[in-house]
Image (cartoon, rainbow, N blue to C red):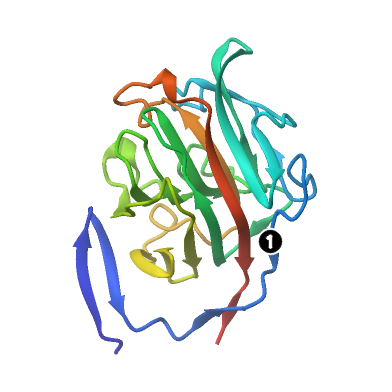
Amino acid sequence: MKRSLLLLLSGSLLFCGKEDPRYSFETTPVWSDEFNYSGLPDPKKWGYDVGGGGWGNNELEYYTKDRTENARVENGKLIIEARKEDYQGRQYTSARLVTKGKGDWTYGKIVVRARLPKGRGTWPAIWTLASQSDLSKTYWPDNGEIDIMEHVGYDPNRIHATVHTKAFNHVIHTQKNAQKVIPDAMESFHDYAIEWTPASIKAFIDGEQYFTFSNTGKGWQEWPFDKPQHLLLNIAVGGNWGGKEGVDESIFPQKMEVEYVRVYRMKRE
């Protein structure tokens, strides 16, 4: 039997010890964007979620499409920029890039190297959602959400990794998550990653594991993660969490910069 040390962290179970020998990952990405071009994000790889309000999060921005003010590639980096400006009845603009229909994966390793925005009211995220909703599970988060990286500007440099399911989510105060302070997350680039297998979802910063969510085999209410998910990158302004301590209007514009996105296929041993 595999021996592990079991720790309780932020309401989550963190497993430290031997890796599961059944699963590993290829060393060449099956999908990637190195941002070695200029202009709008590559339309073969990225789409947009467009609209205001944050789909229930009470965010202040309007997410735009094909607008370089909010999403562009320059100097080898993807720039997602939140701006203070009147647009479509909102006072802020931003972008929410998605790979849905262009990059959808069941299991794998996802690595995003990013530098985060700063200031009270910013809420950047690197995360995944189900690409195809099961009609028997019609409400969020029944189909599953994986937050690879979340950060709120009023709590500088504290990085969150979280898993949301029907059984485990913040609405009912059962979410599974962990936190790690990265002292220069807003000044320097770091690798934010997950390793997702049929057995678990593990989160890493710069290769150091700090969170594990394990598949207990108790059903989809706890583990809906055996179907394709897609990646999202965005900066929200305000909202239920990001705006909990208000928004400092003087800080804008603010950027999340991304050096690369790499997805590696899982292998079964």
> In the displayed structure, would residue 206 be above or below residue 134?
below
Could you say which quadrant of the image residue 49 lies in? top right
Instruction: Using the image as rendered, state which of residue 25 and residue 251 is in the foreground.
Output: 251
Could you say which quadrant of the image residue 2 lies in? bottom left
| Residue 240 placement (x, y as % from top left) | 37, 27
Question: Which amino acid type is marked by label 1?
Answer: Ser
Q: Is 184 positioned to the left or the right of 130 in the image?
A: left
> In the displayed structure, would residue 43 be above or below residue 62?
below
Q: Identify the element where label 1 is drawn.
A: strand
Query: What residue is shown with label 1?
Result: 32
Whether residue 70 is visible: yes
Q: Is 249 positioned to the left or the right of 88 in the image?
A: left
Numbered disc total: 1
Residue drawn at x 60%, y 55% as measured from the top left: 259
Question: The N terminus is located in which quarter?
Answer: bottom left
Residue drawn at x 70%, y 45% as measured from the top left: 74
Whether residue 229 is visible: no
Q: Is 232 positioned to the left or the right of 201 in the image?
A: right
Residue drawn at x 39%, y 42% as measured from the top left: 151
Number of other residues with Cα within 10 Å of mark 1, as a class: few under 14, some 14 to 19, many 20 or more: some
| Residue 258 placement (x, y as % from top left) | 58, 50
Instruction: Using the image as rendered, state which of residue 1 and residue 41 is in the foreground.
Output: 41
| Residue 14 placement (x, y as % from top left) | 28, 66
Question: The C terminus is located in which quarter?
Answer: bottom right
Residue drawn at x 45%, y 53% as measured from the top left: 188
| Residue 87 placement (x, y as % from top left) | 63, 14
Could you say which quadrant of the image residue 38 lies in? top right
